[in-house]
Amino acid sequence: MPIYYRAPDLVVSHRSIDVTITVRRAYALSELTDLHIVAPVRPGVTGPRLLGVSSLAGALVTVPVIGPMSQMLMLVVVGLQVAAACACLRVRSRPAWQLRAWYRGEPVRLYESGDRRTFDAVCRAVARAREYDADQRLE
């Protein structure tokens, strides 16, 4: 039984793709249709960035409102707002490639990885397994 790829969360053999996300699930290669790659889309991460910009705007409003009453309170509030802004503006999304297919009439995600090299190795393994499966059916 040829094994084309083996990892803790995925095994690609000549007959099936065994995926472990929360439970182990085996997908027969002969029953997979419309196998395709979903390339990552780099979203603008607008949510966290918008929060960061609004936090900086809030810091500018805090100075004239709280400043005359208590400078220490103003410094603490502005410091917290600037720290929140820095945390929100540093958020980076990691792109993830997905291998998807239809299995018995339902869409399934076979594999997902943020590491391009690993994802390419899995795709090559699946391609070799499908070629082997097609050759065996011809004989």
Image (cartoon, rainbow, N blue to C red):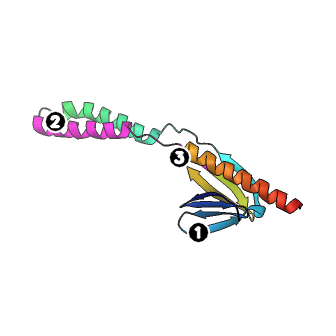
- Identify the secondary structure beneath mark 2: helix
Q: Nearer the viewer, mark 1 or mark 2?
A: 1
- Identify the secondary structure beneath mark 3: loop
- Identify the secondary structure beneath mark 1: strand
Residue at (79% x, 59% y) in the render: 133
Q: Earlier in the sequence, mark 3 or mark 1?
A: 1
Whether residue 70 appears in this view of the structure is: no
Magenta stretch holds residue 70: no
Q: Residues within 10 Å of mark 3 (few under 14, many from 20)?
A: few
Segment colored magenta: 71-98
> Is 22 located above or below residue 61 in the figure?
below
Q: CA distance from mark 3 to mark 1?
A: 21 Å
- The answer to whether the residues at label 3 and label 1 have Cβ atoms under 8 Å apart is no
Residue 29 shown left or right of residue 92 in the figure: right
Q: How many marks?
A: 3
Residue at (17% x, 40% y) in the render: 76
Q: Amino acid at mark 2?
A: Leu
Q: Position of residue 41 (x, y in %)?
A: 58, 40
Q: Earlier in the sequence, mark 3 or mark 2?
A: 2
Q: CA distance from mark 3 to mark 2?
A: 40 Å
Q: Nearer the viewer, residue 33 or 24?
A: 24
Q: Position of residue 128 (x, y in %)?
A: 73, 52
Reading the image, the residue beneath label 2 is: 75
Magenta stretch holds residue 76: yes
Residue at (53% x, 66% y) in the render: 22
